Image (cartoon, rainbow, N blue to C red):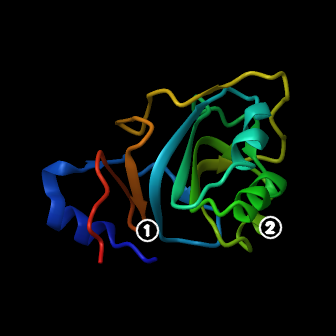
Amino acid sequence: MQYNTSALCDLYGDQLDVLEPIFSHFGGRLSFGGQVQTIKCFEDNSVLHEVLSQDGDHKILLIDGGGSMRRALLDQQLASLAVEHQWQGIVVFGAVRDVDLLEELDIGIMALASIPVLAGQQGEGQQDLPINFAGVTFWPGDHLYADSTGMVLSQDPLDVD
């Protein structure tokens, strides 16, 4: 499904939180939306394999990597796993790698930057908790919509038809 965040802002105005424009697109899908699932991890992507192996239909994974750009939390292997399990998108408050390969995948991926060094695997990470970045607090179960213009967040699903 295609989303138009400008039109959503016009229709829903004060019901939406608008994320600060600090992200770049890295995935093959520029428009995506769905229900939010959250992870908080810093330079450690251990928990991502477990989460992305779950059914992601109509879901967006928000990863709070603390804004670190020293290690990539997401790579082509993890993103391919997300596609396999039908995740709609992944937003990384941190870095990704394998950007040429990520662009070929049918999933929305937004992150701060890219770096070739992969994150560690020390078993750190927390799931399903409120996280805050880009001027917005995300709660599990919120709904995020993204396109080439930006990203917006709603507590409730929006009628986008």
Identified at 66% across, 72% down, the residue is 106
Query: Can you give x and y, in whole percent of width and height, for residue 126 in the image?
Result: 62, 24
Identified at 51% across, 61% down, the residue is 58
Relative to the observer, which residue lies in front, 86 or 17?
86
Is 109 rendered above or below residue 119? below
Identified at 64% across, 32% down, the residue is 68
Q: Residues within 10 Å of mark 1 (few under 14, many from 20)?
A: some
Is 145 rendered above or below residue 45? below
Q: Which residue is mark 1?
A: 147
Is 80 rendered above or below residue 62? below
3D distance between C-alphas at marks 2 and 1:
20 Å
- Badge 2 or badge 1: first in the primary sequence: 2
Per the image, label 1 sits on a secondary structure element best described as loop
Amino acid type at circle 2 is Leu
Query: Can you give x and y, in whole percent of width and height, for residue 156 in the image?
Result: 29, 50
Identified at 81% across, 58% down, the residue is 76
Query: Can you give x and y, in whole percent of width and height, for residue 63 in the image?
Result: 59, 39
Q: Residues within 10 Å of mark 2 (few under 14, many from 20)?
A: some
Horizontal side of residue 98 vs 30, given as left or right: right
Query: Can you give x and y, in whole percent of width and height, for residue 130 in the image?
Result: 44, 28
Quadrant housing residue 6 = bottom left
Horizontal side of residue 58 vs 151, given as left or right: right
Amino acid type at circle 1 is Asp
* Residue 133: mark: none
Per the image, label 2 sits on a secondary structure element best described as helix
Q: Which residue is mark 2?
A: 101
> Which quarter of the rendered picture does the C terminus lie within?
bottom left
